[in-house]
Amino acid sequence: MEMDFERCYRAVDSRDQRFDGWFYTGVTSTGIYCRPSCPAITPKRQNVRFFPSAAAAQGAGLRACRRCRPDAAPGSPLWDVRADVVGRAMRLIADGVVDRDGVPGLASRLGYTERHLHRMLSAEMGAGPLALARAQRAQTARILIETTDLAMAEIAFAAGFGSVRQFNDTLREVYASAPSDLRTARGRQQAPAGAGTIALRLAYRPPLHARALLDFLAVRALPGVEEVRDGTYHRGLRLPHGTGQVALTPADGHVAATLRLADLRDLAPAVARCRRLLDLDADPAAIDATLAADPALAPTITAEPGIRVPRAVDGFEQAVRAIIGQQVSVTSARTTLTRLLAAHARVDHEVDEADGDRTPGQPHDQRGGTGGGAPGGLRGFLSAEELLSLPDSGFGMPGGRREALRGLARAVVDGTVDLAPGVDREEAVRRLLALPGIGPWTANYLAMRAFGDPDVLLSSDLAVRRGAAALGLPDTPTTLDRYAERWRPWRSYATIRLWRAA
């Protein structure tokens, strides 16, 4: 979206929630910045400035509005659509790369110098990578202050700040309040029970077809890793500093999330991955409007508005699922994956028994290994290293597919293939296709679900073709590809709708 003053001001004047996260409104007369839908009185034109990011507004000396909480708005849908360097950088910053590896690490991942990266982000976002990461740290700190009883020093380092002084100065600047005042404002609200437990709301742009999301995840749920129960999706997480578990419950205007983390430094990446999993930053109004222009899809839009593309919390996990799911049913793939995880659990148990130095009751992953045990029982999916440690008998599949999985795992371990959210999508697909046992369907499926490409049509997929036939559309790959040009740039969303039609 271009920062056109008249268009932005009309959105603010109408308090249009669809534009939350697209831009931020700075009010120079009060020194605050808001989301477009802020319920406060619309400021006069001469007192308004518009910013492409919260970091840019903070850099102009403005503080966050306490009424509309602009830092809790949905993220910009641009970063799902855009595959350029700025889009990739924003996805990596959200995943906490700057906090873990600094700006040099971010620049290295993107293949640019720090100076050029700073120039590109400043030109489009109004702030450089450090300022963008700082704004995210402030939001993470506020969440921890308001949802936990941790000491302020613990919160400072968990949020990614280098010192308590930096933490105090940043929160005073962003929220015009001392950290202790933010906690006082919480009132009598009790923090969630349990160490490392955080409850928060994940905002989205309505509509959200929650049942379609939960149905998709439920039929593919792996025992011990994830489950859907009573309208809530539970799963274990493998995170940069440890493990975790999340419960996600769709509600009106938000998804209620309860996170249990072994290390609170993982809060920002855990939130980013949950948002990505449920595709919460999408703009369903724009997507549905494009697809509804096709008379064949229009009835499905009317019946089920707000369909999202379920994405992934772990690129390697999604790649393993895709390889195992080649040319087999969802049920068969789930059975094979369950056997694979059971084989890994047996190997992990044997390692535990053989480790005489282990403290009784201490999980394998806390001893410096890569196990995916989560605080609440569910585990994250196995890592590439763990897959490579399995014997042939642990795979329970034909030799060709077993070696395809091992080839993928070796490529991930040695860095040949990158499955992170900020990957160059086209380059990642090329590298995947160079691996034995990975064809166009698998690579494109990963582009859609692991890399977040919104414009992938799996025209050779049998269920997609059945769905197309059910809607009276061409159902051969070539003819369907030609027909689907009218669905650009949202062909991934059309794919989900064809699956549901099947």
Image: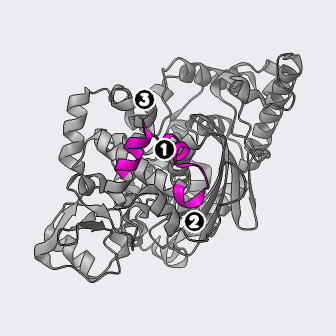
- The answer for how far apart the CA atoms under marks 1 and 2 are is 26 Å
Residue under numbered circle 2: 255
Q: Give the residue type that dot 3 points to.
A: Asp
Instruction: Find residue 14 and report its horizontal and vertical position in percent.
Output: 28, 82
Magenta-highlighted residues: 145-170
Residue under numbered circle 1: 156
Mark 1 or 2: the one toward you: 1
Q: Which mark is residue 92?
A: none
Q: Residue at x 71, y 48 (%)?
A: 330
Residue under numbered circle 3: 101
Query: Is 178 or 245 nearer to us in this picture?
Result: 178
For the residue labelled by badge 1, is the local secondary structure a helix, a strand or a loop? Answer: helix
Please tell me whether residue 147 belongs to the stretch shown in magenta.
yes
Query: Is 210 or 474 nearer to us in this picture?
Result: 210
Q: Is residue 160 left or right of residue 224?
A: left
Q: Are marks 3 and 1 in contact (CB under 8 Å)?
A: no
Q: Is residue 368 left or right of residue 2?
A: right
Instruction: Find residue 13 and report its horizontal and vertical position in percent.
Output: 24, 81
Q: Quadrant of the N terminus?
A: bottom left
Mark 3 or 2: the one toward you: 3
The quadrant in which residue 72 appears is bottom left
